[in-house]
Structure formats: structure tokens, C-alpha cells
Image (cartoon, rainbow, N blue to C red):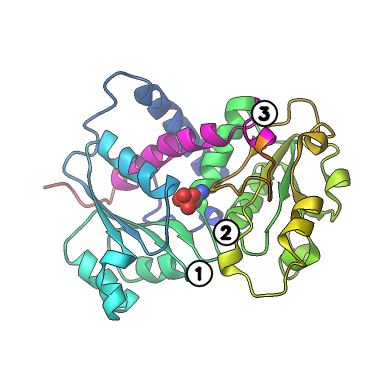
Amino acid sequence: MSWPHKDLLCVSQLSAGDVENVMRTADSFQEINARPVKKVPTLRGKSVVLFFAEPSTRTKTSFDIAGKRLSADTFSLAKSSSSLVKGESLKDTALTLAAMNPDAIVIRHPSSGAADFLARRLKCSIINAGDGWHAHPTQALLDLFTLRRIWGSVAGKTVLILGDIAHSRVARSNVLLLGMLGANVKLCAPKTLLPARPESWPVTTCPDLDEAVEGADAIMCLRLQLERQQAGLLPNLREYSRRFCLTAERLAKANPHAPVLHPGPINRGVEIASEVADSVESRILDQVSAGVHVRMALLHLYLTRRDAPAAG
Ligand code: CP
């Protein structure tokens, strides 16, 4: 099946068929990632710039590993070591990178819309690795991959998203993707950490975690993003964790064997208790592994699409 998209900015660009294509391609790369020699020549001659203007452990490393396992050349640029710190604009940085003729730029940036800004100006593929509060499409796709490995399909399942939803690009992307595929999404957060108009989202909300976990088939905890918050959104951390930390006692009220997800990095004892993070129900490290399979699939699909510039 040919891949019709130049860029990945938001999951809303993808059809259900596109998502299925990503999942099946990721399935095939999972097998390669289990081999003693985890390298195939598929993207030999292609180059991928990893432009991360915000910190990242999982996304940046897994894109790097994904590219290298497909034999692409990957080049990393971090904000702290780039000319952004000398005042170069995003536009000039993007044009400079494009002049080196990469096949794709993977970008993480604190501004919502940064990936779209590049996509409208550059010929190479732009893959959004997280822009402000807006979107983190590759995270939602790897979360879906993780849930499909457990259930086969997410249709009809209830997924509870818990925590700092207002500041979360992961929540926004998951709400869209899970909703598109027929899952029921429930949100649980203090009022101050819900999105501005939650009634306009295809979700139900419940402010009481003990009630919200009842009937949940999976629980996705979110990090409290103190770096993006204005002062005064929370009374204090202890009160937040008393009401919104996923403990073993609360998890026991969800449906039996409900998997627990978290995009990471986790704040143990704040949004998730250590005993839950380390429990058999925790799929946090499976998500990290899925990140490599799914990002290999995405690099493969975007860099081998019919109108992709030929290598060499
Ligand atoms: N989930 C996620 O985006 O993690 P990193 O910030 O470590 O990439």
C-alpha cells in the first residue's frame, strides 16, 4: 500500500487505513528488533535530522535507533548546542537544515505549530516529535501499538487518561486516535488541569479518581508538567498526589488486569505509585520498546513513499 503523506504533524491527518498500515509495518519491524543483528538496508542513503529543541530521552533515542536499524544516517541537533542559543530563528534554522538536503527532519519544539511551520516551508518530510501542548502523534501511535498487542483491537474498550491533561500533547493525540478507532476515552484531572472546553472533546470526564477507575480497561497516567504550568493551578503536590496518584488500591477498582501506561518520564509517587509503575500491569517499558518498532515503521513509510526524493 503506498503512503500518501509527506509529513506527520497530527494523528488527525491519518485515516483508519493509514493507522492500520503503520501498525502492520511496525509488527514486521518488531520481528527485526528481536533478531541478533537488528539492521536492514531499507533506508540506506537516506538522512534524517533529529532536531530537538526540548529535552527527550525516549523519543530522540528511539528515532535515532530506528533510523540506524534501517541503515539511514541520523544527525542530532539539540537546542543547547545549536545556533538557536545565538538567536537564530526557527525559520532560519529550518532553511539551514533543509539546505543540507535531508530526507526527513524529526522535530520537537516547545511551540505548538512548529512542525507545521517547517512542513509548509520545506520539501523534506517533517515528523512531529512533540510540539508544545498540541500533538505528539508518534507517542499516540506507539501507545496504540502497545494496547493492540494486549487486546488486538481498542474498539469498545474504555481508556482512562489521568493527570495533567491541559498541558499534554500526549493526551490530545491519544484522545483523537483512540476515538477514531472506537475506544471510549474518559478523563480524570483536577478542574484546573482539564482542557479549556472538555465538553467539545469526544470524551467523558470524572473528577474523582476512585470513581473514574471503575470500568476502565486501561489507565494512562500523565506526568505533571510543572514546567508548562502557570502558578496556582494546584494547591500543592501532596494534595495532588493524594487525590490523583494511581495507587495499587485504586488500580484494583479498574477492570481485571487493566494495563497501566505512562508516556514517561514518570514522577513516582506523584501521578503513579512506585508499586504500580513496577507492577505486572505496568506496560511502561513495553511502550518504550514499541517506540522503536513504530518509529521504524514511520521512517520507512515516509521515506519510501512514491514521491520521496531518491537516494543518491
Ligand atoms: N514520551 C516522551 O515523549 O518521552 P521523552 O520526552 O523522553 O521523549
Residue where numbered disc 1 is placed: 112
Distance CA(mark 1)–CA(mark 3):
33 Å
SS class, disc 2: helix
Q: Is 220 situated left or right of 128 in this image? A: right
Q: Residue at x 80, y 51 (%)?
A: 242
- The magenta-colored residue range is 275-303
Q: Quadrant of the N terminus?
A: top left
> The residue under label 2 is which amino acid type?
Arg
Q: Residue at x 23, y 65 (%)?
A: 97
Residue where numbered disc 3 is placed: 281
> The residue under label 1 is which amino acid type?
Ser
In the image, which is nearer the foreground, mark 2 or mark 3? 3
Q: Nearer the viewer, residue 55 or 117?
A: 55
> The residue under label 3 is which amino acid type?
Glu
Q: Residue furthest right?
A: 211
Residue where numbered disc 2 is placed: 169
